Image (spheres, rainbow, N blue to C red):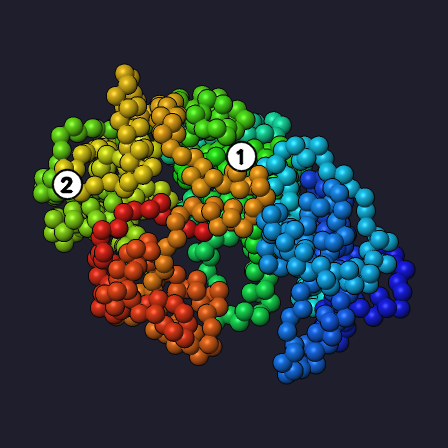
Amino acid sequence: MVEMNLSTEWAELYAHTPNQDNEWHRLADHLLDVACQAYELASKFKMGDFGYNAGLLHDAGKVNPEFQKYLRKCWANSPDQSRIKIPHSVYGCYFCKEDLEVIRPVIAGHHAGIYAMREMDELLHRHQAKAEGIQQLAQEFIFQYLRQVALPEDFRTDGLAQETVLRFLFSCLVDADSRSTAIHDKQEPAKPPVRSSIRECAEYFQTKYMAKFDNVGATQLNRIRREVYDKCLAKARQPQGVYRLTAPTGCGKTYALMAFALEHAKKNELERVIVALPYTSIIDQNAKVYRNYLPQEALLEHHSGVEIDPTEEDASEQSRRRREATATWEQPAIITTTVQLFESLFSNQRSRCRKLHNLTNSVIVLDEAQTLPPHLLEPTVDMLNILVKHFGVTVVLSTATQPALGPGSPLRAKLKEPAEILDNPTQYFRDLERVTYQFDDREMSWQELAEDIRKEPQILVVLNTKKDAVSLWKELRDSESYHLSGLLCPAHRKTKLAEVGLKLENGQECRVISTQVVEAGVDLDFPVVYRAFGPLDRIVQVAGRCNREGRPQKGLVRVFLPSEGGAPRGDYRHAMEAAKIVLCQPGADLHNPELYEKFFKAFYRGIKSDRKNIQDRRRQLDYPTVNDSYRFIEQTCSVIIQDYPKEASPVPGILARVRAKGHVSRGDWQELQQYSVSLPRYNYEKLFQKQDIIKDSILGIDLLRKGIYHPELGIGEPDIMDPMDLIA
């Protein structure tokens, strides 16, 4: 702590009310504590003095006698109606002169969220009358510690880099502020807990993985997996930058990716590894794998599907530690969703931004990189470039179907040329050919398709829309058939997938009619897969559900043309057209990874990769608009299913417990999510008008009327087109 020389007046100014030991939090202590912490955090990206000044100024407005009076009323639990919150965040902005002016939106928004720069003049004018008096009270202390700064030339000339740096400074400020307050409130130890280092994690992982190899046979598959693993380790010792792992299903990519990331972080003295995946189902599988190969508590899962004990009080130590971990991302290994990662990077909200500074000096692995939303590609790729250039980040793109994001891309924003981790990825696709692709040129009706399906004892059929999946399932009329789509709640899908997996394992008849929910992250193994013609990457993804174990007899992936039904509009439809163009070229081979880069180049030529003009908004430092515009999926409405399963639905019990408490906690909501279905707004309105959706006025949540949920088809309403089912 900085040594202070305080006047009598400053010694009696406070930032927060007394803690459990009846100790007031002195304002001078808080300002300097936050300043020093923010300096340390921001120094990782060479903006330490800006972080320090933001911390020093953020609560300067609390010198206001009205605020001090407010604190005392809070402490006394005064019922006085005048106990109205007193603004304090804006007043530190009046001390920001010249190059320090850029941090005004950060200081003013350290509770409400980063302001747009265009709002600052009006905001400062609105508070001008009181500002002069507050400045006079604060200046004795502030001018004693305020540091001179100069904005680096890179950020002065590059508006997008400056926008990102301010967002990271905001992260440093709110994290330091939260920690200082939590330490005062005795909710956090003054010294952070000791965690495993990246070096320890890397060495632990390699030791455990080598032990695994010692216990497996020397088959060709295991030889390939060991070779891929060794090449990843060797490449990991290279300098930081952009890498890509182009590898087929079955080559041990899950292990090799983490081995590369940990070794690369160790070699380059980085702080953590962040693995981002598109689907919670993949995260569940990968997290189980990684937990066996990492030190205890080294891995943090952060996504909506992480279970929290619903009986656990929100104020409990275990719950508090879990919330703190997901807020800060301080563990050496993080596994999360691409939605959580990128929507946080473009957010202006305190809760989402707090962890951002911990992306500095890290390895970010984007698994299934081809799933990045096309309409957000320009801001997304630009953000990745900024992280690599200014924040010491290494980016790894991993997939069997690499998107065209490098120099040859038709996109305006391009990644630096990615270095291939595997020198000859095509060879591994040849060595691990598990399926034969068959394209059927003739159009097939649902009736014709159903006749073909009945001939196969075990088959997976994937359609382009929910409506098509429902129509074909009804046409099939088969007691051994299953319907899977986003019309089913997650708990229902999990139950069905478990039943399907057991039947496949036991060699029983099993026919699954599905949407794209099975295309990635679902561990099913069918001998035959039918796929309605669609985007090329989707066809290859569903091929990963065919002959996964690499049996000698190749599986069959048949691509057909439905004469009925339809396909989602917009980018999805355009991707189908790009697939037709690429497949018509001489020598088109779905076992050659170069084909997919050609497909993505053709696809990207016809899309709007910044549909909501986010880049222009970023250049204008318009943080609230960027926050609202950068969304992987358009707004949906969650509806809770009350009667699944009919015999023993846990939902009524959960709702009764919640009503007794009078509010929905995070644990309650996560438990209810397993029995919810997300609907587009227009479809929600349709059901609401039919009174099939009931709004619980006490809890503020939507419930599906009992008797509506179908035991096979779920929520019904099959006219919904499938969105990308990505879950934050």
Q: Nearer the viewer, residue 677 or 647?
A: 677
Residue at x-position 56% and y-position 54%: 349
Q: Position of residue 508 (x, y in %)?
A: 19, 48
- Residue at image coords 59%, 55%: 113
Which label is found at residue 564?
2
Where disc 1 sits, the SS reads helix
Q: Earlier in the sequence, mark 2 or mark 1?
A: 1
The image shows residue 402 at horizontal and vertical percentages of: 42, 30
Image height check: is 71 above or below 123? Answer: below
Quadrant showing the N terminus: bottom right
Question: Mark 2 falls on what kind of element?
Answer: loop
Q: Determine the CA span between mark 2 and mark 1.
A: 41 Å
- The reply to whether discs 2 and 1 touch (Cβ–Cβ < 8 Å) is no
Task: Kindly identify the residue that appears in the image at 26 percent across and 65 percent down.
Answer: 689
Q: Which residue does the numbered mark 1 point to in the structure image?
A: 382
Reply above or below: 708 against 624. below
